[in-house]
Amino acid sequence: MDTAVMLFTRDLRVHDNPALAAACAAARHVVPMFVFDEALLPASPNRVRFLVDALRDLDGSLRALGGGLLLRRGDPVAETVRVAGRAGAQAVFLSGDVSRYAARRLARLERECEAARIGVSALPGATVVPPGALAPAGGDHYKVFTPYWRAWEAAPRRPAAALPDRVAPPPADGLTDRRCPDGHVELDVVAEKFAAGASPDLLAGGEAAGRERMRRWLDEGLPGYGDGHDDLAGDRTSRLSAYLRFGCVSPLELAAAARGRPGGEPFVRQLAWRDFHHQVTAAFPDIGRRDYRPRDRRWHDDADALDAWREGRTGLPIVDAGMRQLRREGWMHNRARMISASFLTRNLRVDWRHGLAHFGAWLTDGDVADNAGNWQWVAGTGNDTRPNRVLNPLRQAARFDADGAYVRRYVPELAGLDARDAHAPWRLPPEDRRALPYPAPILDPEP
Ligand SMILES: Cc1cc2nc3c(=O)[nH]c(=O)nc-3n(C[C@H](O)[C@H](O)[C@H](O)COP(=O)(O)OP(=O)(O)OC[C@H]3O[C@@H](n4cnc5c(N)ncnc54)[C@H](O)[C@@H]3O)c2cc1C
């Protein structure tokens, strides 16, 4: 074939990108493009910030291979069909994705490309094992993690896709010529308009940063993962989630590199959790809207409590520390996510969809499958086999922040207290308590 369009979505890498590799193998000329989707841009300044970094980096990598990234803003389907038409492309390549939005986008793209006699190929790459590749007897997807994990471990892996030797743009196509100045202006414009208010301590996005973090993690962090991953203050997890979310790092390469190393098994298991939620979402695209397993929970409408939770002023230090970490870093430790989500849905009895929306607005790694899958898991409406599990915040604090360092780091009002008081400032003598500029608990913390 003469020309193909490579439509990047959230697979922002050149290494192990099956769609890019297939486009380059199938066509003499390739137009790599990305469309800022007007419907998604306002969702989260943190993710826009990370995305802009990742696109700059991707553009640099593609230029080094011969062709830079064409940027467009608007409806991704209309823009892709327009670019493919102008470039005289015979096919569009992209990575498959699982959200309801992505599934509808692909269906529309296929319809409109078919009308224009352009082929569409959606390839795997977003997960280690593609959603839908594994199914239990008599079902279309796994509903429980442990059997999924067993099947996942034994499942065959695709070979990693080769880095293309060259991404050759079409000769003088009138598209790529104007790409460079427009593209960079566009990134600045998007960042200014949609990344305003991003968290101050965000990680830098992009494949180069992601691969460097992956390399260091595998060498230095992984061996301590089994013992350290729940240590809130120790910060001993990979922080690769946003790179995985935007496809800056290949989950297949990461899992293959971690497997068999010390610390590898518990870490690879977490990557399997990610795949698990993706295959649930592919089968139940309403995961962000409806209970996966309806439990007839009665939710409590309490706008003040919800605001206090969002802003990290519930008066429960371990909850507030997590919620403030989220705002400061656009990321929260997994254990803190579980504690704060349990507090919202189990103690305050607020609907999990409010928590999901808040996390969705701030998490750089926020995505439908993992965010909604985990919220429903904690709320007891999802895939947890023990749906009545409630995490006691004080016991969790004593166990996972025993010396209070996490709380003191993110709740500076409590910085001068020892662990016992930092986790339960309401127990202080009344005059000490009154002197603390920290709120009283919004519900009885020790009923
Ligand atoms: C309420 C709630 C909401 C969450 N929302 C998201 C989200 O939107 N996006 C997201 O990537 N993760 C989400 N998680 C899962 C988990 O908290 C993060 O993946 C993890 O904290 C990211 O940090 P890390 O990269 O250092 O993880 P590590 O511990 O280093 O784990 C490695 C990778 O495994 C995957 N992973 C780990 N735990 C989980 C899990 N429980 N479910 C799915 N994948 C997992 C992630 O891709 C992660 O980067 C959520 C968890 C909870 C309890």
Image (cartoon, helix red, strand yellow):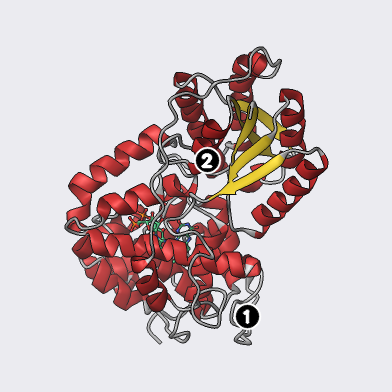
Q: Nearer the viewer, residue 98 or 387?
A: 98
Marker disc for residue 198: 2
Label 1 belongs to which residue? Answer: 299
The correct choice, above or below, for 412 with respect to 391 in the image is above
Q: Quadrant of residue 431?
A: bottom left
Q: Which amino acid type is marked by label 1? A: Trp
Mark 2 nearby-residue class (10 Å; few <14, some 14–19, many ≥20): many
Tag 1, which secondary structure?
loop
Quarter the C terminus occupies:
bottom left
Q: Position of residue 125 (x, y in %)?
A: 48, 49
Q: Residue at x 49, y 25 (%)?
A: 62
Distance Cα–Cα, label 2 vs label 1 = 31 Å
Quarter the N terminus occupies:
top right
Closer to the N terminus: mark 2 or mark 1?
2
Tag 2, which secondary structure?
loop
Q: Position of residue 207 (x, y in %)?
A: 41, 35
Q: Nearer the viewer, residue 389 or 256?
A: 256
Does any atom of ligand 1 lie closer than 8 Å to the CB of label 1? no
Q: Quadrant of ligand 1?
A: bottom left
Q: Position of residue 253 (x, y in %)?
A: 35, 47
The correct choice, above or below, for 191 with respect to 348 in the image is above
Q: Residue furthest right?
A: 115
Q: Residue at x 44, y 59 (%)?
A: 129
